[in-house]
Image (cartoon, helix red, strand yellow):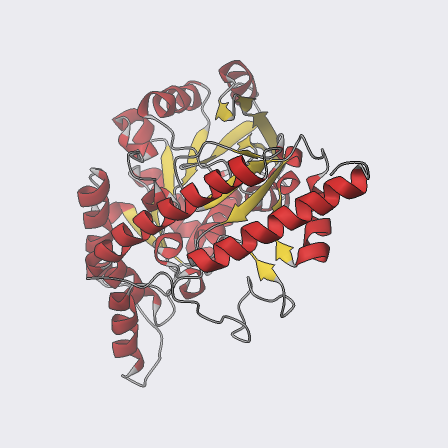
Amino acid sequence: MTFNFDKMTNRFNTNSYKWDVGYKELPMWVADMDFETSPAIVKAMQKRLNHHIFGYTSVPDAYYHTVAQWWENRHQFHVEKEWIMFCTGIVPAISSIVRKMTNIGDNVLVLSPVYNIFYNSIVNNQRKVLTSELIYKDNQYSIDFGDLEEKLSNPDTSLMIFCNPHNPIGKVWDKETLKKIGNLCIKHNVLILSDEIHCDLAHPGYRYIPFASVSEEIAQNCITCVAPTKTFNLAGIQTSSIIVPNPELRKLVNRGINTDEVAEPNVFAIEAAISAFTEGEPWLEALLDYLMGNKQLIEHFIASQLPDLKFIYSEATYLAWIGCSAVTNDTKYLCEFIRKETGLYVSEGAIFGGNGNDFIRLNYACPKVRLEDGLQRLKKGIEAFQHLSNPSRK
């Protein structure tokens, strides 16, 4: 079966958060794809729509079975059905877990640069952000384990929010790294909360390893958040799962998401997830091939047309992390300039913390023609910025 990822769907006037921009602007910022989702998912939701009654919805046993089967078959991770809890989204889950599993004033550790909403979930709940900055060398990132252990050993550190694969840098963490982090968390009595929403978007040739699959000891100290929403472009459907092997932790997490009223599905959430995980794999495989073509297009374009920029080596996601330090150390201003000059809207790296101020993030999950438009705008913006900074530059 073939899928048309080249289709240029118009998303203006659809209440799209991503496309709430000027008519001539091009948004390539938030992690939301410009592809229509799998036809199998649309068919399942259409069937539900045709019922014409949209009352309160429960979570059937089939949902838990389907989630468990996907992780078993695609990621070789055995998940018991009773480990799984439905949640309306990973961000609501993270915020609820921060509230339930830590105390006001506790340190919550992250590896930066990292998904910026982690910071919100910590600060908005009166906890303190503790960052261990990733080491950046030769266009790649690695963990400073000395710094990480020092911060894990702080008696006020009670939780580590981990990103696997890592957004925005596109890192797929290998088993040995996960084991080392997991064992340090056990050693220092720090709970692991692993956001694995990008897990199905590992690039061909790379394998995502579920954090909780590394060892039984780590599984008992790990809460995992997963969803089909990034993979199948379903963010607006609000459907996710929390996987917790430890029954005592699971009891607390379950109490938290129910107290916070984020444990009940909307009328389409169950059908969308079940159809994604039972019938969506052919679409996903085609998507991954298409995304790889887009990624290669960006790499070639930057190397040949924008040599002052650096395309950072990545292994997952559809988010290009682009180094701009040879152009400026203030990418917030650079992004504002590019948007004003060309209409291209990309994410400033500073919001992700760490050394993010030297980077921009560009979402390339879109038809090739749209990506080519974005790259030409990027080139125009960078060249205009450089000319403004150095008028003698040609």
Q: Answer whether residue 226 is visible to the viewer in this image.
A: no
The answer to which of 220 and 19 lies nearer the viewer is 19
Which is nearer the eye, 219 or 308?
A: 308
Q: What percent of the width, then of the height, locates residue 364? A: 47, 50
Quarter of the image with the N terminus is bottom left
Instruction: Give the residue drawn at x 63%, y 30%.
Output: 355
Residue 379: in sight, yes or no?
A: yes
Q: Residue furthest bottom?
A: 52
Q: Quadrant of residue 258?
A: bottom left
Q: Position of residue 151 (x, y in %)?
A: 56, 21
Q: Nearer the viewer, residue 308 or 173?
A: 308
Q: Position of residue 184 (x, y in %)?
A: 43, 19
The structure residue drawn at horizontal position 39% and vertical position 39%, both measured from the top left corner, is: 316
Residue at 81%, 36% in the rendered image: 392
Residue 355, compared with residue 27, is above or below; it is: above
Which percent across, then down, holds residue 298?
Answer: 48, 43
Which residue is at a point 69% across and 40% down the rendered structure image?
331
